[in-house]
Every structure is written in structure tokens, then in C-alpha cells.
Image: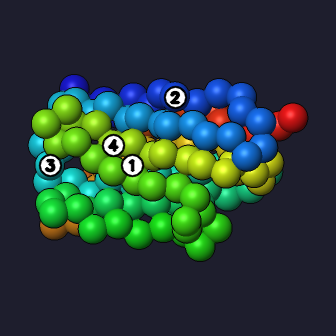
Amino acid sequence: QVQLVESGGGLVQPGGSLRLSCAASGFTFSSYTMNWYRQAPGKEREFVAGISSTPGSTNYADSVKGRFTISRDNAKKTVYLQMKSLKPEDTAVYYCKARWGLINREYWGQGTQVTVSS
């Protein structure tokens, strides 16, 4: 059974930090590109960051470059999103997505809420 389980969300003050985790099971994690998306209330889901399988090149949305860092641990089948200098506009539900383009397969997690507020 395929599962992606996000954790690490919560309430943080502006300027603070959080680290999100997404634990995978039920598929060959190391073969999949891993991405983080987010969806704020009333807005469409948007791409935040991505990391390829091996050796792990990364890319980021312009809005988070220099503040967020995506990483992965293939041995633990987990992808991380380190978020620093958080802003109120980062408030959203954050989702992880696994995608293997070669076989056109993708999976989504259930999301974790991040709220940036004083």
C-alpha cells in the first residue's frame, strides 16, 4: 500500500523556522522525484520545491528561493523541507508528491498545515 505521510507543520511566528518531513512507503522511493506543493485558502495548489531521484538536483519556486531547502534520505525513504524566515504568505497546507515520469505515476500525501502568524 502506497503511503506518503507529512509531518512537522504547525503555528510559527514570522521569521521563524519549521522542518517538514514526508515519509514514504509502498513504492521504490529512490526512483521517484519528490516535490513539495502548497495550497493556501482560496488559492490553487502551487509548486514549492523539487528534488530528483539520485543524485538529487533541486529546484524551487521563486517565492521560496534562499529560504527553503529540500533534501531527501533514500535510506529512510523520507523527503524534508527546511523552511526559514517564514512569512505570513507562506501559510498553507503543504503536500508532498512522488512522481516517476518514466512510467507516468505519481502519489500525493494528505498534507500538513503550516500557519505563520504573530
Label 2 element class:
loop
Image coordinates for residue 23, horizontal then vertical, percent: 32, 31
Q: Quadrant of the C terminus?
A: top right
Q: Amino acid at mark 2?
A: Gly
Q: Which of pointers 3 and 1 indicates the residue nearer the eye? A: 3
Q: Amino acid at mark 1?
A: Lys
Q: Which residue is mark 4?
A: 79
Mark positioned earlier in the residue sequence (4 or 2): 2
> Could you give the CA–CA distance between mark 1 and mark 2, rounded to whole angstroms?
16 Å
Which one is in front, 2 or 65?
Answer: 65
Q: Which residue is mark 3?
A: 30
Image coordinates for residue 15, horizontal then vertical, percent: 73, 46
Mark positioned earlier in the residue sequence (2 or 3): 2
Camera sees residue 32: yes
Q: Which residue is mark 1?
A: 97
Quadrant of residue 1 in the image? Answer: top left
Label 3 element class:
helix
Image coordinates for residue 109, horizontal then vertical, percent: 43, 37
Determine crowd level at label 1: few under 14, some 14-19, many 20+ residues with C-alpha closer than 10 A: many
- Label 1 with label 2: CB-CB less than 8 Å: no
